[in-house]
Image: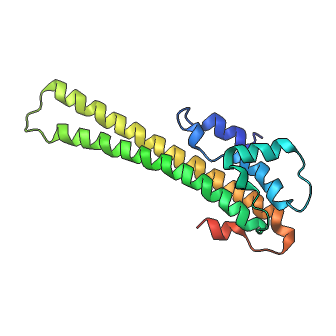
């Protein structure tokens, strides 16, 4: 069975990879956040988390749920920003196609070909956005579930019910 962090790297488009949820880093963050009262298992994990989330990633004095939620919100903002830009690109592509299609009929063959290319590009972009959405939704769902599983013995409620609909 392939680990999900590796699956993201394998399944994400090359131009989307840096904008996907940092699953592996969040997985390391769980150990640091949940085990905050203990000595971190490795300085490499702490450094990886700080490289992505900055020096405030530790958030000493805050409950683990709150600290991890902040990290999730950071990742969600990154994913949503990229998705928003991709949707704007799709809308621009559709506007271009509409501008071509709105010309008075009959449309010459080269105009119809240009319209077909624009619509094909829009369709590919839409599929790409949906793939990105599903991959990241799965990543967030899995990492929240993993956090909840590690916190199960603490008697605290589920972060998944708070974070995911």
Is residue 136 visible to us here?
Answer: yes
Q: 80 or 136: nearer the eye?
A: 80
x 55%, y 49%: residue: 79
Colouring convention used in this rendered image of the protein: rainbow
Image spot of residue 40 (x, y percent): 88, 51
Is residue 24 visible to us here?
Answer: no
Asked if 114 appears above or below 98 in the picture, the reply is above
Count of marks overlaid on the render: 0
Q: 51 or 141: nearer the eye?
A: 51
- The quadrant where residue 2 appears: top right
Q: As drawn, is 40 to the left or to the right of 108? A: right
- The quadrant where residue 77 appears: bottom right
Image spot of residue 23 (x, y percent): 69, 47
Q: 16 or 39: nearer the eye?
A: 39
Image spot of residue 17 (x, y percent): 59, 37
x 59%, y 44%: residue: 20
Q: As drawn, is 148 to the left or to the right of 70? A: right
Asked if 146 appears above or below 88 in the picture, the reply is below
Residue extending furthest toward the top: 110
Asked if 98 appears above or below 74 in the picture, the reply is above
Locate the N terminus and report the quarter of the image it occupies: top right
x 52%, y 44%: residue: 131
Locate the C terminus and report the quarter of the image it occupies: bottom right
Residue extending furthest toward the front: 55
- The quadrant where residue 74 appears: bottom right
Q: As drawn, is 105 to the left or to the right of 14? A: left
x 71%, y 38%: residue: 6
Image spot of residue 33 (x, y percent): 80, 59
Q: 61 or 140: nearer the eye?
A: 61
């Amino acid at each position: 069975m392939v680990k999900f962090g590796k699956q993201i790297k394998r399944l994400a488009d090359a131009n989307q990879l840096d904008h996907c949820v940092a699953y592996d880093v969040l997985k390391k963050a769980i150990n640091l956040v949940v085990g905050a009262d203990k000595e971190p298992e490795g300085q490499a994990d702490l450094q990886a988390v700080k490289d992505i989330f900055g020096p405030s990633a530790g958030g000493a004095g805050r409950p683990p749920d709150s600290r991890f939620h902040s990290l999730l919100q950071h990742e969600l903002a990154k994913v949503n920003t990229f998705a928003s830009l991709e949707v704007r690109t799709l809308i621009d592509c559709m506007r271009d196609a509409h501008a071509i299609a709105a010309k008075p009929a009959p449309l010459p063959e080269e105009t119809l070909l240009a319209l077909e290319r624009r619509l094909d590009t829009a369709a590919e972009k839409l599929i790409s956005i949906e793939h990105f959405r599903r991959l990241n939704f799965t990543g967030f769902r899995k990492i929240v579930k993993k956090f909840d599983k590690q916190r199960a013995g603490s008697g605290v409620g589920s972060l998944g019910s708070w974070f995911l609909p």
